[in-house]
Image (cartoon, coloured by chain):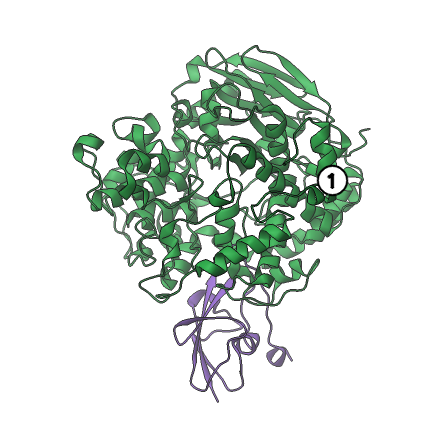
Amino acid sequence: MMTVGGTWGQFLHIDLSSGRQWLETPSDSVYLNLVGGRALVAYLLLRDLPAGADPLGPENLLIFAPGLLQGSNLPGSGRHGVGAKSPLTGALASSEVGGWWGHEFKRAGFDALIIHGRAASPVYLWIHDGRAEIRPADHLWGRDTADVEAAIRREVHDAQARVAQCGVAGENQVLFANVIHDVNRAAGRGGLGAVMGSKNLKAVAVRGTLRLPVADRRQITAVAKWLGENYATLAGWAVKMGTVQGVRNWGRLGALPTHNFSRPVFERWEAISGQLMHETILDGRDTCQVCPIDCKQVTAYDGRPLAHPQLQTRFIGRLHIDKAYGGPEYETLASFGSACGVDDLLAVAKANEGCARWGMDTISLGMTIAFVMECVEKGLLTAAQTDGFLPRWGDAEALLAAVEMTAFRRGFGDKMALGSKRLAQWIGPEAEALTVEVKGQELPMHEPRLKQALGVGYATAPVGADHMMNMHDTAYTKPGEDLNRVAEVQAIPPLALTDLGEQKMQLFYHEVNWRHALDCAVICHFHPYRYSHIAQALTGVTGHAYGPREVLAVGERAQTLGRLFNLREGFTAADDRLPRRVMEAFTEGPLAGVAIDEEAFQAARQYWYGLMGWTPAGIPTRARLDALGLTDLLLAAGIALPA
Amino acid sequence: MSVLVRLADSLRSGAEPSHEIVLAQARTVGEAVSQLNLPASVGLVMLVNGRLAHWQTELQDGDVLQLLPVIGGGTFRIFSSARQR
């Protein structure tokens, strides 16, 4: 029996350059303090990746990191983390993904997978019940993700094998290529698929049937029972329609990112709404391992005649959408829709399908295309520069062309594959003023002018702009379950969306630590757990006592380690900023005049640094590292402490 | 005094079927929202006379309070003590 329940006591390392495999036996302290996911990714990168390494070089690590709750069958635990140094940003890349892969991997007998080096020719890994094999993958290179999954399942003679893979975009090192799991779920952001492709690693297939020992199963059962009784009420929005209702909510309010965030109003929001999608091309809903919520959208279109008063499409009978590739969520409806001015639902859903088929992040790609459209509108790009590709706002044909050109790096797609920041540097200073990114990662589809603490989160997240490791101010405008959860450590009253005062940032401190803790455990954010539920689950799994504050400390460790990694890679507090565009007031719609106050924003950021135990320059202090138990952990691993 | 509350479609339910509700006693946005039976599991954006408001915003006679649901981590459960009795 391990001294930490819920673990196998071993990380699997594989060096693709030499073919060598070895097992690492982590200390109890690594398991109990870091838990898994993002904290573990950042720790391993600090320990094993040389400073300044090329993200697409063989030195980079590709880390698959479940948490202590994977394999426990706690609802919401069908997720795991993937990480590396990001080729898009040069900072931490850390993305979570749902499905079944994490569960199968954990039950194969390993607590993490760390991939080093670069194979001489394409390979895939087959990991099953305590064994790992490196197999040739030349025959899988260049194929669609669904084909690759089917081929691997045939080869390993297991229809239930779960496959994580880089698509064609990852092979081609598109800087925002993602790691596709189960064909239709993505460890989406930061270019993890490009790292995978750079290693000549096509896929990691897993299957596990080992029974994971946990310390006290009754604790897991108690938390699962609470979730079963409450999810339909507390996560009703996710059960009923899911994320796609966001288009209507923000469209109606005038806070739907439109035309590369230059407008908050998209008059044609009804043509890309979740309601329309549900009434036309929705084929069903999908779910992850041990999840009752079924939040995922699945869309299909077979070319049949299709009519709806809101549907504006030029693609009736002209394209098919394969349900194997899932369907667009809110982020994708907005990034390919309103952000590009496209009001054609079939085109948006087809663009989403392309991203699952070839493995690209829909947010970064949508925002890169939107940026190109704005450059074309402003005359900053010429046909000579773009091989004649000059897309205009709302051009659905160009949208679909751009997705394919980028995945295969054909024509101007070779430049779009760099993401908006590097593309802007290539075009020139006037274009650089139009980018909407933080640390090189494009903004998700949530307006920081409306959700202003979320804006601080965009600026400070260790991966660049991200809406998941963040807090959404709209959840805390009235009494309710979100503030009840926070009240487990601090009572805070309802606060205004635009409030950036000290109470708001205290709330932000707790809730962002919470989101990071979920990404270490790794637990789905849509499961309405309280801090104490995850504390009880971790206690039950490990046999070591956690309370709400210990859970939040896990998230704080993840952020602190991410910070230390980024500082080592040359980032400073000056990189914790928002793009110029969103620092200007809304100019139209119901929210016209609403703006972020620059002084209040800076003060909020500095106040939060203080709450994190960081200096005014954003550097973690020795005192806080001591308090978090990180000093010993870092020194034991030979990691230098900040000066 | 009276305040007119306008509910977006998805906030209406069997318990609160109307688009528009007139409240006679509500000094703040919070007092107004607390008198309604709104569905659980949505976040809320509040506008008073078309301008962004918050829980503590004071209401005047004749104000129009518009309530819009949002998602993104929001869950809440508010029941009217008066109507539940």
Nearest the eye: A315 or A113: A113
Q: Is residue A613 left or right of residue A99?
A: right
Q: Give how far across and how far down residue A142 sits, in percent.
A: 38, 20
Chain letter, purple:
B
Circle 1 sits in a helix, a strand or a loop, which is it?
Answer: loop
Colour assigned to chain A in the rendering is: green
* Image quarter in which the C terminus of chain A is found: top right
Give the number of callouts: 1
Chain containing the residue with disc 1 = A
Please give the residue where the numbered disc 1 appears in the rendered image: A629
Q: Give how far across and how far down residue A123 sits, in percent.
A: 49, 15
Nearest the eye: A605 or A480: A605
Give the quadrant of residue A270.
bottom left
Work out whether A270 lies above or below A190. Answer: below
Give the quadrant of residue A622.
top right
Work out whether B8 lies above or below A382. Answer: below
Give the quadrant of residue A46.
top right
